[in-house]
Image: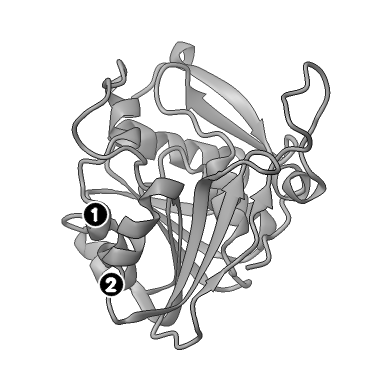
Amino acid sequence: MFAEAELTEDGFLNGRLRIAQPKGGYRAAMDPVLLAAAVPAKPGESVLELGCGAGVASLCLGARVAGLRLTGLELQAAYAALARRNADRNGLSFEVVEGDLQAVPAVLRAQSFDHVIANPPYYPAGGGTAAADPGRETALREATPLAVWMAAGLRRLRPGGWLTVIQSADRLPDLLGALGPGAGSIVILPIAARPGRPAGRILLRTRKGGRNPFRMLAPLILHEGAGHLADGDDHTEAARAVLRDGAALQM
């Protein structure tokens, strides 16, 4: 488990959530906030997050939509404990189960969910320089194939349920290739840092048994202008609504 000296407390949703994170391990930024904003959840529904880490995505979703039944699956015990702590700190109910999505624990196999969400590791196995911190390396570099993440998510959905994933834009072909015939109504939202820049991230949403045609949406632009401001907030109005106010993304 993390010692207190190894943690910082960070604000999300303009300070509405206070989240403990490791100084040297995996630290959530805006990606889990964007993921939470893309989930079309309604009060009373159930949500499973695969690889929940410190719980940022699920807790951002719980802060936006009241009355959800939130569950997380996390491989690393220290991060699972941190997610539970963060849920308690913010007054949200969040059941976190320790386990590997390649062998989903029986308590989760016995359930189906209205929504499954995931922020799988962005970097493929092999190549590159490994992160010095093992927890960060586990969170960022793929050990379990992306196809396994998608299959595990779809299996845990009830018929008509939604799978929502955020991923590096260059992995979009892998994501689409991992979806079997049971997934439909696919929607892709590209996310670009600035106008005229290529998308660095994508949000994918698909419905189990969905029959609507594939849709590629106009990109969400995160920042105004061509370059970083030395002072001030240059987020676009749409990005600010999500990152600060906890608004939903329309997909």
Residue 84 picture location, percent across and down:
45, 41
Residue at the spot of label 2: 155
Q: Secondary structure at mark 1?
A: loop
**Label 2 vs label 1: CA separation?**
11 Å
Name of the residue lying farthest toward the bottom: 211
Residue at (29% x, 81% y) in the render: 181
Residue at the spot of label 1: 101
Residue 2 picture location, percent across and down:
38, 21
Q: Amino acid at mark 1?
A: Leu
- Placement of 25 over or under 112, stated as above or below: above
Residue 79 picture location, percent across and down:
37, 34
Query: Horizontally, is 26 left or right of 15 in the view?
Result: left
Q: Secondary structure at mark 2?
A: helix
Question: Which residue is nearer to you in this view: 32 or 231?
Answer: 231
The C terminus lies in which quarter of the figure?
Answer: bottom right
- Placement of 58 over or under 228, stated as above or below: below
Q: Amino acid at mark 2?
A: Arg
Query: Horizontally, is 238 left or right of 208 in the view?
Result: right
